Image (spheres, rainbow, N blue to C red):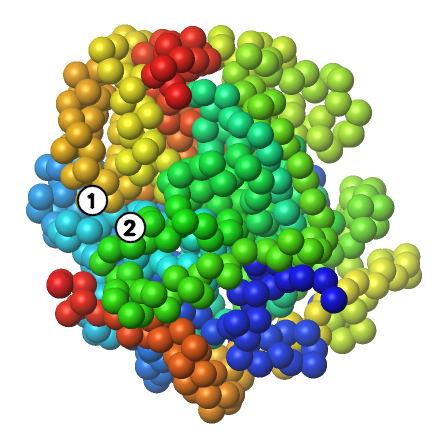
């Protein structure tokens, strides 16, 4: 009998019942909540007269709507200028208070983007099932946890039953072997994978990242990679547990301690695909071939290396694809065959659940240090992923580097990734963004998003146009 | 949950691949704490010439005459024909809420994003997968004849064309059963409450850290 994949193991260890019709009931260990996708679920619970199944499995934080300027933040929920946003953040606060759910509220030093705070506080542990009403829940798979986004009806279902009705997915392995060139990051791997398999390439699959280049990534890098599994269509991203995972978790607020820790570690050591496990599909990339990536279009698969050119629809034979390219070029205000390095930027956004962790800020600061944001750039934002990330960065003096270079240093939240708060693009503006989606209007109606790594975003900020970050830094600095 | 058994309706063709949930319902409308009110802002950036904001009177906004759903022949459409990877992007259930409230009951495309596909079934909206060739043919027929209508039968898993042509589609048994009967899934799961409790006891014994110090997130622990 063939061995099991990591996904198979996680699925089996959480299976409450398997129905004859192929559906199953899966137990959920951790449920993360934020203000946007939970209000209707709590309302549904109340209307049906139901109570949460297990309060202490839930952890909440407001992130999508929260203002990121310190002035607006100081006044708390009451000071959120946008009334509709304020009501939504207040509703999460009210619901958590009513049910006794732990919330890192707007004033809590641990508040931040839900996918940053879970791992940061040890609320995400290896071997868990983790769900959240947010597609980037795939992030938590970096810890060998079975983690995926759910809709609001499922948020209500998990609150009420601690279970999800699920169908088993297929297994996809993406192997990245070899060493990344200096200056090339997890974000570039993610974009290169999506560029290779497409935004629907992982649909129906749990996607496990494997290979020597993945093992070499830090936990922050692994989170960036799993975060973007959903942009390749895979609800679930996964990486096997190793010593790095265990070291990262150790000592965090909600991590087990003492004898429980030893027991847990022994169990977590099993959280990898067996050597003889069979995957339904395997995709291989060579790490050494990956260059810094820049998206040019309106889907994350519309991405090329920084030294490449914008594609020409005239050479595309598939009519639907040609139409998509033409539409994207029109929306983005780009010409076929234009060099990526000729794209000029109006705004820069460094942040989001993809790239707002300490390692991301360090990489961007290394580029920004001693340089100035180009005069043609209207705004360059750095939005840390959480209170602790912000505090750590300030302790290292990264805030000063950014401020001296002309960046704005903000309070934690989702911010310009999706522009639900006041941080947004104006129509026609180009933004070098470390976020995850370049959809039409994502960062503001008519806004034009280019997805890049934090170092590439900082390089674009100081040059005013895209540039291969490796040209700005000496080898020793980018290593 | 709203039931779906059989439906006959006017087809609107949206000839784009990778239509994402940001397009289906832009984020500014996600600030609502209601389950309703999203229909007028479905495809907001394509449908109107100005920028929509929550609370605005949408009936006074300028419509984009080039957008397919604004064309006279597609008024009252309840079957949306689309291209591959429809509903990609975020997990927002506001997307099926908006489609359903606008009046769509059936979607037909070669493929959907997983989370969106799942969310549709929770809201009485049937996402049908047909082959590329079948979808191409439907696009051709819908363009060729005004008032083009399709009949969809969930029990028989068929899409019937006006010319009598029949396409069969797949749907998994559990989702089909729930949709046909309009079942409350939470109620179904709670009927297995004893089994969930028994699993929980076994799970706790095997993985005590998921329930004790580590697994519980509580105020006491949180403030420690």
Residue A189 percent coordinates (x, y): 53, 32
Provide the residue designation for mark 1: A388
- Is residue B191 visible in the rendered image? The answer is yes
A476 or A202, nearer to the observer: A476
Check the picture and name the quadrant holding the N terminus of chain A.
bottom right
Counting from the top left corner in percent of width and height, residue A224 is at 43, 40
Q: In the image, A279: left or right of A390?
A: right
Residue nearest the viewer, comparing A273 with B56? A273
Residue shown at the point (49%, 10%) measured from the top left: A341
Give the alpha-carbon distance from disc 2 to disc 1, as whole Å.
Answer: 8 Å
Chain under callout 2: A
Can you tell which mark lies on residue A120?
Answer: 2
Mark nearer the N terminus (2 vs 1): 2
| The label number, if any, that marks residue B23 in the structure image | none
Q: Residue at x 34, y 16 (%)?
A: A477
For residue B5, say whether it is visible.
no
Label 2 neighbour load within 10 Å: few <14, some 14-19, many 20+: many
Q: Could you tell me which chain the residue with mark 1 belongs to? A: A
B207 versus B134 height, above or below:
below
- Both labels 2 and 1 in a single chain: yes
Residue at 80% of width from left, 73% of height from top? B156
User: Percent position (x, y) of residue A278?
Assistant: 71, 55
* Closest to the observer, B173 or B200: B200
Quadrant for the C terminus of chain A, please.
top left
Cβ–Cβ below 8 Å for labels 2 and 1? yes
Q: Residue A129: x percent and y percent?
A: 45, 64
Q: Secondary structure at mark 1?
A: helix
B183 relative to A452 in the view: left or right: right
Label 1: how many residues lie within 10 Å, few (<14), some (14-19) or many (20+)? many
Please name the residue shown 13% across and 63% down the image: B224
Left or right, A410 with respect to A417, comes to: left
From the viewer's side, name the closer residue of B96 and A194. Answer: A194
């Amino acid at each position: 009998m063939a061995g099991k994949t990591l996904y198979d193991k996680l699925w089996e260890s959480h299976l409450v019942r398997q129905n004859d019709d192929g559906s199953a009931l899966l137990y959920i260990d951790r449920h993360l909540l934020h203000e946007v996708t939970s209000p209707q679920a709590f309302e549904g619970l109340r209307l049906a007269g139901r109570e949460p199944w297990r309060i202490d499995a839930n952890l909440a934080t407001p992130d999508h709507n929260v203002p990121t300027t310190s002035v607006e933040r100081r006044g708390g929920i009451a000071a959120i200028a946008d009334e509709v946003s304020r009501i939504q953040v207040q509703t999460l606060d009210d619901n958590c208070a009513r049910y006794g759910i732990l919330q890192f509220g707007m004033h809590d030093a641990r508040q931040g983007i839900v996918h940053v705070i879970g791992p940061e506080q040890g609320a995400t542990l290896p071997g868990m099932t983790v769900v959240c009403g947010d597609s980037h829940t795939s992030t938590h798979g970096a810890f060998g946890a079975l983690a995926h986004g759910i809709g609001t009806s499922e948020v209500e279902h998990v609150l009420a039953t601690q279970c999800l009705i699920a169908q088993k997915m297929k297994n996809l392995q993406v192997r990245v072997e070899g060493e990344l060139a200096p200056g090339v990051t997890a974000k570039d791997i993610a974009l290169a994978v999506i560029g290779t398999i497409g935004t629907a390439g992982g649909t129906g699959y749990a996607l496990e990242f494997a290979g020597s280049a993945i093992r070499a990534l830090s936990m922050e890098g692994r989170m960036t990679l799993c975060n973007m599994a959903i942009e390749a269509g895979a609800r679930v991203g996964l990486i096997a547990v190793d010593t790095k995972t265990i070291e990262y978790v150790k000592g965090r607020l909600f991590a087990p301690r003492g004898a429980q820790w030893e027991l847990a570690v022994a169990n977590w050591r099993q959280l990898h695909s067996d050597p003889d496990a069979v995957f339904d599909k395997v995709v291989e990339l060579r790490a050494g071939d990956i260059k810094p990536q820049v998206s040019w279009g309106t889907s994350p698969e519309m991405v090329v290396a920084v030294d490449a050119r914008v594609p020409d629809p005239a050479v595309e034979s598939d009519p639907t694809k040609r139409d998509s390219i033409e539409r994207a070029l029109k929306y983005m205000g780009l010409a076929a065959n234009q060099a990526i390095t000729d794209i000029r930027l109006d705004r820069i956004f460094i942040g989001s659940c993809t790239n707002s962790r300490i390692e991301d800020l360090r990489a961007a600061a290394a580029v920004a240090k001693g340089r100035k944001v180009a005069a043609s750039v209207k705004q360059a934002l750095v939005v840390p992923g959480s209170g602790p990330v912000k505090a750590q960065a300030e302790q290292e003096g990264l805030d000063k580097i950014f401020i001296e270079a002309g960046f704005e240093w903000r309070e934690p939240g989702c911010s310009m990734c999706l522009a639900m708060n006041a941080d947004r693009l104006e129509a026609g503006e180009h933004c070098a963004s470390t976020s995850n989606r370049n959809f039409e209007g994502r960062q503001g109606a008519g806004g034009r998003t280019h997805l890049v790594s934090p170092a590439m975003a900082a390089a674009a900020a100081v040059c005013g146009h895209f540039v291969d970050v490796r040209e700005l830094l000496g080898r020793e600095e980018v290593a | 949950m709203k039931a779906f058994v059989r439906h006959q309706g006017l087809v609107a063709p949206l000839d784009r691949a990778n239509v994402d949930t940001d397009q289906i319902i832009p984020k500014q409308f996600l600030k609502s704490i209601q389950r309703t009110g999203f229909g007028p802002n479905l495809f907001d950036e394509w449908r109107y010439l100005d920028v929509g904001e929550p609370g605005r009177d949408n009936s006074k906004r300028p419509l984009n005459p080039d957008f397919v759903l604004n064309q006279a022949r597609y008024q009252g459409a309840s079957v949306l024909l689309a291209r591959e990877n429809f509903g990609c992007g975020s997990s927002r259930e506001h997307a099926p809420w908006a489609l359903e409230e606008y009046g769509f009951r059936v979607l037909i495309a070669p493929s959907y994003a997983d989370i969106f596909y799942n969310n549709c079934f929770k809201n009485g909206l049937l996402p049908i997968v047909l082959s590329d060739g079948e979808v191409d043919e439907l696009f051709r027929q819908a363009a060729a004849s005004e008032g083009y209508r399709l009949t969809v039968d969930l029990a028989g898993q068929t899409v019937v064309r006006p010319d009598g042509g029949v396409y069969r589609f797949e749907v998994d048994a559990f989702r089909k059963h729930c949709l046909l009967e309009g079942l409350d899934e939470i109620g179904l799961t709670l009927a297995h409450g004893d089994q969930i409790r028994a699993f929980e006891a076994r799970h706790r014994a095997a993985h005590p850290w998921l329930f004790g110090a580590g697994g519980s997130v509580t105020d006491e622990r949180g403030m420690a």
